[in-house]
Image (cartoon, grey):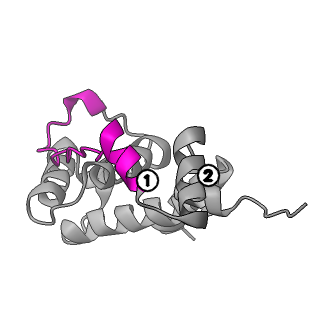
């Protein structure tokens, strides 16, 4: 009895010792891809259908670039490792999701001095430790407390 496509894909993923989370994610993207194209078998589709699916993710579903790349890698795995069909990923010209620019907020030296100076007691000590040692808040809070 022939195995279903997702069962074969699951077996191939497990043979390569991918994490369980990767398995769930890849199988989810493979399923969404097939459903997006009306349950058409992937061996009957190719570059054009991959581009349509990835473009839809970016345009209509507004996914992040990393999510779109995750879907793309799942489809590459499906075609190359499961179906044995070579897909040149350089030739896939889907509209890519836009990378969001994250600008970190950084305090000036004078602002840091002001924050530390206007704090009192334990809070001032915590701020001095964070700033002086380059600690993040969770790193500071996870330090064990020892009294002499």
Q: Give residue 18's position: percent from left, percent from top.
A: 61, 52
Residue farthest to the right? 148
Left or right of 67? Residue 2 is right
What residue lies at 13% left-to-right and 52% top-to-bottom? Answer: 55
Q: Which mark is residue 46?
A: none
Nearer to the camera, 15 or 131: 131
Residue labelled with disc 2: 18
Nearer to the camera, 26 or 126: 126
Label 2 Cα crowd, 10 Å radius (few <14 / some 14-19 / many 20+): few
Q: Give residue 58's position: percent from left, percent from top.
A: 15, 55
Quadrant (top left/top right/bottom left/bottom right) for the N terminus: bottom right
| Residue numbers of the magenta segment | 89-117
Q: Residue 146: which quarter of the image?
A: bottom right
Left or right of 111? Residue 13 is right
Quadrant (top left/top right/bottom left/bottom right) for the C terminus: bottom right
Residue labelled with disc 1: 117
Q: CA distance from mark 1 to mark 2?
A: 51 Å
Mark 1 against mark 2, which lies toward the viewer?
Answer: 1
Question: Can I make out residue 5 in this image?
Answer: no
Nearer to the camera, 88 or 55: 55
Left or right of 77? Residue 56 is left
Look at the numbered disc 1 and give the secondary structure of its residue: helix
């Amino acid at each position: 009895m022939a195995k279903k496509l997702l069962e074969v894909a699951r077996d191939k993923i497990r043979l390569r010792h991918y994490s369980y989370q990767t398995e769930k994610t890849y199988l989810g993207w493979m399923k969404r891809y097939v459903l997006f194209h009306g349950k058409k078998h992937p061996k009957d589709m190719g570059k054009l259908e991959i581009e349509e699916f990835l473009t839809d993710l970016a345009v209509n579903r507004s996914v992040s670039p990393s999510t779109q790349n995750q879907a793309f890698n799942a489809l590459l795995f499906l075609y190359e490792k499961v179906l044995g069909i070579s897909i040149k990923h350089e030739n896939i010209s889907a509209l890519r999701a836009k990378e969001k620019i994250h600008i970190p907020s950084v305090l000036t030296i004078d602002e840091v001095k002001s924050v530390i100076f206007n704090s009192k007691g334990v809070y001032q000590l915590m701020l001095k430790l964070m700033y002086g040692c380059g600690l993040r808040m969770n790193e500071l809070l996870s330090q064990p407390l020892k009294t002499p």
